[in-house]
Image: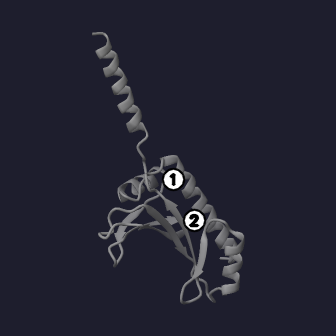
Amino acid sequence: MKLLPALAAAAAMFATAGTSLAADVTARDPQTVLDALSTLGYRGTLEKMDNGRASIAVTISGLNTFIDFYDCDDKMEDCYTLLFVVLLDLKEGATLTKANQWNQTEITGRLSLDENGDPQLDYALSTFEGISGSVFEQSLKRWDQKIGDMKDYFDF
């Protein structure tokens, strides 16, 4: 009979351990991203793009940044990837050569040019099974650093 309380205690411990492994931030739930941003001192606004994709507008490094939700189901609701995006509005744009030089030397932060030659930086973060708040925080710090690097690179 003493075995039953021991089994119940072990089951409770296992259940608790399982819930502690739950992810804090996931692209499957935009509110978790908003909450993580808020915890880190950023104020984000959830928006919907024309195609129904969720996007969070947030100011990082003094620039309007967007966190878009990708790898979603057909209803654009069940997503796995966050794509951080920022655009520099340069007076004369940038050259493809300069953008390619960036991409050849940088391992994170893909650079492309829009129709005006303005550089757009993006950074993908997979949250398939969810990520911890600390991983999100480090990713956001890395994103902030990449924006600073890009601003320096283009003398912005």
On the image, the x and y values in percent for residue 116 come to 56, 89
Q: Is residue 117 left or right of residue 34?
A: right
> Which label is found at residue 136?
1
Q: Secondary structure at mark 1?
A: helix
Of the pair 42 and 144, the residue shown nearer to us? 144
Location of residue 33 with respect to 61 vertically, above or below? above
- Image quadrant of residue 109? bottom right
Going from N to C along the chain, the mark reached first, 2 or 1, is 2
Location of residue 9 with respect to 100 vertically, above or below? above
Q: Is residue 24 left or right of residue 115?
A: left
Type of residue at label 2? Ser
Quadrant location of the C terminus in the rendered image: bottom right
On the image, the x and y values in percent for residue 75 come to 29, 69
Q: Dot 1: few (<14), some (14–19), or many (≥20) neighbours within 10 Å?
A: many
Q: Secondary structure at mark 2?
A: loop
- Image quadrant of residue 97? bottom right
Residue at image point 72% right, 71% down: 105
Mark 2 lies on residue:
61
Residue at image point 70% right, 82% down: 98
The Cα–Cα distance between marks 2 and 1, rounded to whole angstroms, is 17 Å
Residue at image point 49% right, 59% down: 126
Q: Is residue 143 left or right of residue 20?
A: right
> Which label is found at residue 75?
none
Of the pair 57 and 19, the residue shown nearer to us? 19
| Residue that extends furthest to the top in the rendered view of this protein | 1
Residue at image point 38% right, 63% down: 79
For marks 2 and 1, give the one nearer the viewer: 1
Quadrant location of the N terminus in the rendered image: top left
Type of residue at label 1? Phe
On the image, the x and y values in percent for residue 67 come to 46, 66
On the image, the x and y values in percent for residue 47 come to 35, 69
Q: Dot 2: few (<14), some (14–19), or many (≥20) neighbours within 10 Å?
A: some
